[in-house]
Amino acid sequence: MIRQPARDAMAAALVALVFIAPVRAEGDIAHGAQAARTCMACHSFAPGRHMTGPSLADVWGRKAGTAEGFTRYSDALKRSGLVWNKQNLDAWLKSPGALVPGNAMGFPGIADGRTRADLVAYLEAVSTGRVTAPDHGLPNLKKADTASLVTAIRYCGDAYRLTTADRKSHTFWEFNLRFKTDSSTEGPLAGKPVLLGSGMQGDRAAVVFARPEEISTFIQRQCS
Ligand code: HEC
């Protein structure tokens, strides 16, 4: 026979289970949102906004390797035949390499099952529109201000001298300036490259062009 205090404890545990279990089964979306920050170094939740990884905008129920406009899927993921449901997302986030050997997601996985469950609940909530998708934090380069709109690039010795639309000039050692392209809808306007990152250390920055063809025509060899 079970002693009274023990029965009380069991009853209390049952009550706790009844109250906690439905919440846990749903997943803690706020905690999931926090966990999703690590994903956002490589993924956006905006439809069609691909980064290192494909947009996760409508990942729930999507066949793996099929986000429209993402051209860098590994063959392994495309051939996996997976559909992104609760079980498969959990297994993918636990160990991408174990679920799909040879995939191209440079992410080791999340060992903690509770964090994964919350993250998967969050992915479902964002994907189905229950929760507003977070901003991906990348600037819209079509709306660059005059301080970052590049009007000229001169190359002399080992230096690039940039002029921006606010008439300021910026000088960089050639090794510290990167040239990039962004062909997405949020990339720069044609012929209007944008200077990024000069506010940070001051010595390293990038100029982003709309298309690769613009890069060498924009840069003039000129010392003065
Ligand atoms: C270092 C960059 C990086 C990080 C961090 C990252 N991913 Fe990925 N992810 C990728 C790449 C690249 C792919 C494409 C993999 C392939 O083609 O094999 C991918 C693919 C995926 C896919 C499959 C999408 C599809 O269309 O089939 C899902 C789902 C996913 N990632 C979720 C996440 C989540 C959730 C996180 C955070 C826990 C995360 N990723 C973190 C780069 C990353």
Image (cartoon, rainbow, N blue to C red):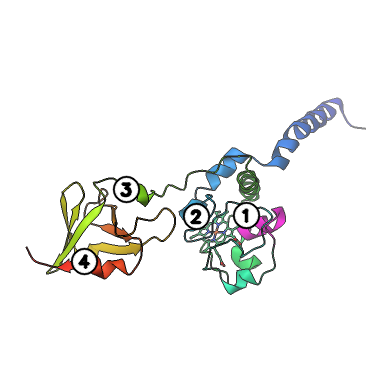
Q: Earlier in the sequence, mark 3 or mark 1?
A: 1
Residue that label 3 marks: 144
Task: Tell me the distance, in whole angstroms, between the alpha carbons under discs 4 and 2.
Answer: 29 Å
Residue 61 position in % (x across, y down): 69, 55
For the residue carrying disc 3, how many other residues have a C-alpha within 10 Å: few (<14), some (14-19), or many (20+)? some
Which quadrant of the frame does ligand 1 lie within? Answer: bottom right
Q: Secondary structure at mark 3?
A: loop
* Cβ atoms under marks 4 and 3 closer than 8 Å: no
In the rendered structure, find residue 59 and report the number of the disc placed on it.
1
Residue 168 position in % (x across, y down): 16, 49
Residue that label 4 marks: 219
* Cβ atoms under marks 2 and 1 closer than 8 Å: no
The dominant secondary structure in magenta is helix
Q: Secondary structure at mark 4?
A: strand
For the residue carrying disc 2, how many other residues have a C-alpha within 10 Å: few (<14), some (14-19), or many (20+)? some
On screen, residue 44 above or below 134: below
**In the displayed structure image, the side of residue 151 where residue 112 appears, left or right:** right
Residue in the image at 61% along x and 40% along y: 29
Q: Secondary structure at mark 2?
A: loop
Residue that label 2 marks: 49
Which of the image's four quarters has the N terminus?
top right
